[in-house]
Image: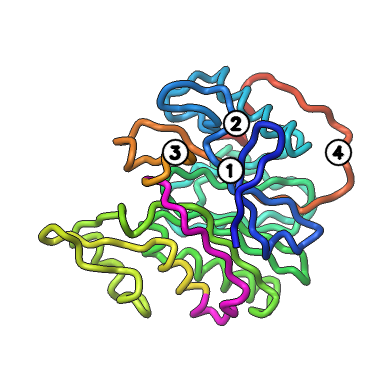
Amino acid sequence: MLSLTKIHSIEYLKSSLLNECDFLTHAFCTRLGGVSEDEYASLNISFKEGDLESMVLQNWNRLAMAFAIPMENFLTLNQVHGDDIFVIKPFGEYFPSDGSLNYDAIVTSRDNLAICIKTADCVPVFFVDRMKKIIAVVHAGWKSTALEITTKVIRLLQKKYDSSPRDILAAIGPAIGKCCLELDATSANTFFNQEDHEAFLFSGSRPNKWMLDLAECNRRQILNCGIPEANIDVSDLCTSCRQDLFFSHRGSGGITGRQVNFMIIKGDAPCRVLTVGSEDPRMQ
């Protein structure tokens, strides 16, 4: 079960399943609690959508202070709607020398690093191996979901870390619902080869249009990897229908902000203080 809660000004959802992991902090943030205005009101965390940089920096600072995580400890991706996975080693340098982070998922066992997914309709998926303390975040838009990125992350956990399905917990955050996600026939065709596609792909009300239940598609991918149904939390909130709570790219017509979804493995309290300055290269 995902429930809405608040810390300082930040309103976010948390999973009851993941909440049982005392080594973990996680949040599916809403758009509420920031300083941005108009289409970007209020907790927009993206520098790329047209919002004022000063506002976005203040939003990151509010988020960092609320969760007591140094701003420089948040890691975001470029998110290119593919299926590449960024694996971060537990120690040492990890940031690419060329500065590019063209991935749609992160896997790590490193502590004190908040791995983030930005969304405005796409599905944020969190995985936790509760025994080995490994976490993963996934940006599953319809293109990445068609590429079965969620399945690929689970298979990586099993192959690289020998994770057992019974030890993996999954939480699927707020995303655009089947009520609002319409695809053309060409796009819909990319899902027909997936198992149980009739459970998440439906004929639309208009000719040659299909409605996609993006959250259910990812849930089915998780189930088909052997993860027990009891290990999966799913939000029933549609980002397009609930623009009072969330940014929605489709619902807004394309001009909107991005909310952040993150997980972090707790470590020793960091000694660095929070600072606000020029944009950190990791915050794309």
Q: Local crowd at mark 1 within 10 Å, few (<14), some, or many (≥20)? A: many
**Does the magenta segment cover residue 236?**
yes
The residues bearing labels 3 and 1 have C-alpha atoms spaced at a distance of: 10 Å
User: Between marks 3 and 2, how big is the CA–CA gap?
Assistant: 13 Å
First in sequence, mark 3 or 1: give its number. 1
What residue would you read off at disc 1? 29
* Element carrying mark 2: loop
Image disc number at residue 247: 3
Name the quadrant of the C terminus: top right
* Quadrant including the N terminus: bottom right
State left or right for residue 130 relative to residue 11. Answer: right
* Among the two numbered marks 3 and 2 on one chain, the one whose residue lies closer to the N terminus: 2
Disc 4 residue type? Answer: Pro
Q: Is residue 109 left or right of residue 54?
A: right
**What is the CA distance from the residue labelled 2 to the residue labelled 1?**
9 Å
Tag in front: 3 or 2: 2
Asked whether the residues under the numbered discs 2 and 1 touch, taking CB atoms below 8 Å apart as contact, a structural biologist would say yes
Residue at the spot 74% in from the left edge and 68% down from the top edge:
130
Looking at marks 1 and 4 on the same chain, the residue that comes earlier in the sequence is marked by 1
Please give the residue where the numbered disc 2 appears in the rendered image: 33
Q: Residues within 10 Å of mark 2 (few under 14, many from 20)?
A: many
Query: Looking at the image, is mark 1 or mark 4 nearer the viewer?
Result: 1
Query: From mark 4 to mark 3, how far is it between C-alphas?
Result: 31 Å
**The residue stretch that appears in magenta:** 223-240
